[in-house]
Image: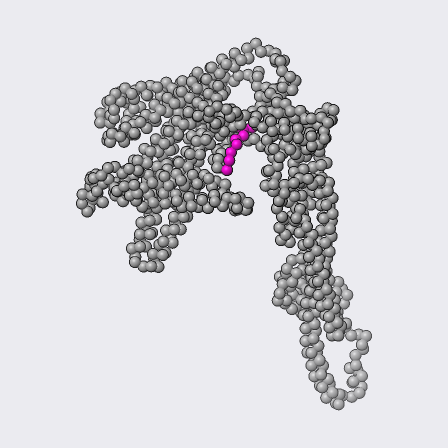
Amino acid sequence: MAESHGGGGGCCPPMDLMRSEPMQLVQLIVPMESAHLTVSYLGDLGLVQFKDLNSDKSPFQRTYAAQIKRCGEMARKIRFFKDQMSKAGVIPKDVLDKEDDIDLDDVEVKLEELEAELVEINANNDKLQRSYNELVEYKLVLEKAGEFFASAHRSAAAQQSEIETQQADDDLLEAPLLQEEKSVDPTKQVKLGFLTGLVPREKSMVFERILFRATRGNIFIRQSVIEESVVDPNSGEKAEKNVFVVFYSGERAKSKILKICEAFGANRYPFSEDLGRQAQMMTEVSGRLSELKTTIGAGLDQRNILLETIGDKFEQWNLKVRKEKAIYHTLNMLSLDVTKKCLVGEGWSPVFAATELQDALQRAAIDSNSQVGSIFQILRTKEMPPTYFRTNKFTTAFQEIVDAYGVAKYQEANPSVFTIVTFPFLFAVMFGDWGHGICLLLATMYLILREKKLSSQKLGDIMEMAFGGRYVIFMMSLFSIYTGLIYNEFFSIPYPLFASSAYECRDVSCSEATTIGLIKTRDTYPFGVDPVWHGTRSELPFLNSLKMKMSILLGVAQMNLGIIMSFFNAKFFKSAVNVWFQFVPQMIFLNCLFGYLSVLIIIKWCTGSQADLYHVMIYMFLSPMDDLGENQLFPNQKIVQLTFLFLALVSVPWMLLPKPFILKKQHEARHQGLSYAQLDETDESLQVETNGGGHGHEEFEFSEIFVHQLIHTIEFVLGAVSNTASYLRLWALSLAHSELSSVFYEKVLLMAWGFNNIALLILGILVFIFATVGVLLVMETLSAFLHALRLHWVEYQNKFYEGDGYKFDPFNFTLIGNEEE
């Protein structure tokens, strides 16, 4: 196994994923005149994680607070443009050229001008639109109220002519004196006033009731429904409204009505009783409406032209402003030198990037015409560096599965190296069916073949997750096809793919019998389970035994791999204590018990013995001195078992006791006589040493270390039993998947086939397809995925993986484009 220390060399290439990249703490001293360009070039490079050296200062006290405020204001304008473009349906053009030669001052001036112009156009358009909506409502009032007044005039004229006829008849009979008494004084006539307007339909009944109560019934109101909804001039939203006409008498009633109209949001419009005047107003309103429509159309065209102009440069400006904001944020993390002529920055960087960083600093100094170059130096520190793995599109998803549990400590062994194979394999052990595997493979191939197109699109949450893990699902599907061929299941149907079955029936009834009814007539089936087992009465006992024992073998193998990984960690960190007092006793304990059980399983398979392994393992502890009798699988088995039992018992105190005492002795030896700090380093190095890890003279808590070791030992001893049992989930889920698949095939598809009815057959096929996709390909996939995840996180990774590190998070411009403000 090649372990990488950052260098390539030698005959074997370094295993980049096994250890995180070696990191170093670098110090940059940059002149003020080239600081901006330097940080910009480092952002393009994306290989430095800056430390905040001004954490004690508030954002407003920092050097570049004004520039950040300025960038924030420009970002606000860009967001305003984006919102306006999305409303108008204008799509910004992609940046074709990656040129970054636009000046921020020019961008600021341009944004200022465009915002002022757009705000003015919007204000004018809103004003015109409001006038237009008011005129539309006025036109409706003129139409509806005009109809009401016209019908009132007609009925009044009819009544008047009737009264006049009747009065003419009465006049012949009445005396002139009486006629004089009946004449009315015109000054005493009651003058009725009226108001017209529109009220929202849902408020119309309440509006009418409130008017009636407020005026004590001294009003007359008529309402007319408008069929189509109209745009309200005040809110700009569509609403269903009624035209109303209210007749009243007196100024007090009028003031009450006006207040109620205002409260109900009823828009009032002037109206004349004179029919000629009404016609004139209608003509004027129609003329103004057509003029406004033309003006609004021209205004919208002008606005769209302006938005198209903005859209051409939008992405370029957006990227520029975001970059500048990120640069100034980073510059604020650098501390100002006492001379105030240069900035001092510290940050983590991979060792391999040192040359690239120096080149970037040199280029920035030349391009900014700086008289003084930047200084690059490496600092010594005891701080824990960040963890950085260089991954590609295939390994990223597997690395994220591990990181979800915890980010690896700096340079500890990375579980992802083996997870790439073991994760999809353990999934496939639970999901073994090559028919279902092919379905998964086809779905994943669609995602992989169209990844360029899909990566640029906005997908839903579930689709985004599936697309991100497409290579994990691809591996899972390949392994599922492999394990499906071993189980010999294609949608639960066995196929003699590799040869004919090795067994034949003695008679017709043997399919109902156990294995005694079968005679072996050919060579053993070459690959996987013989198809003859499927459908017999002995299928379940046979497959249960096979899968249960296979689960234990796989579990013990993976747990051993975990302990071996702890050895590589101990060797890499040069910890002999962990090798001799953790790795060795753990290997002895696990393999003397469960490694021994695995060997017994293999011997039983090879010899065809009838020994009861439960009995062997239980009585190995309860009565180790008894004879094994018929359960003996090999000579001297009793002596071997006693030896293993003794070694397992010895390994427990071996794990528990020596390590705390040895650590205490090492601590005392390390700090004996060190009363004073050594002064053989530079000032900067000393400062970093002190900040980073002043653990030098801390008191050694022996009790704490001992309790920790006790917990670790108990956890391992109990975990060895519980973790082995936990791997039986492989058997349980595999059985559940197989049985569900069999039920859907026999009880849905075959039953529908048996009815000899085309409609029922089509229905059966549809139910089978939906059940297979919904239950087996979605729910079962998710279930097996989660169980495989648990086996890796708990049973495998707890043997060696600390996972208490933190990710390398460099200052990088490529991430800025994907961020949402």
* Image x and y of residue 570, in percent: 46, 21
Q: What residue is rendered at 35% in x and 39% in y?
A: 483
Residue with the most extreme front position: 11
Query: Quadrant location of the C terminus?
Result: top right
Which colour style is shown?
A: one colour
Please say whether residue 652 is one of the residues in the magenta stretch. no
Q: Dominant secondary structure of the magenta stretch?
A: loop
Q: Residue furthest top?
A: 673
The residue at 65%/65% (across/down) is 242
Q: Nearer the viewer, residue 734 or 17?
A: 17
Q: Residue at x 21, y 42 (%)?
A: 504
Is residue 388 highlighted in magenta? yes
Count of numbered marks: 0
- Answer yes or no: is residue 267 visible: no
Q: Quadrant of residue 611?
A: top left
* Magenta stretch bounds: 385-393
| Residue positioned 39% across, 44% down in the render | 438
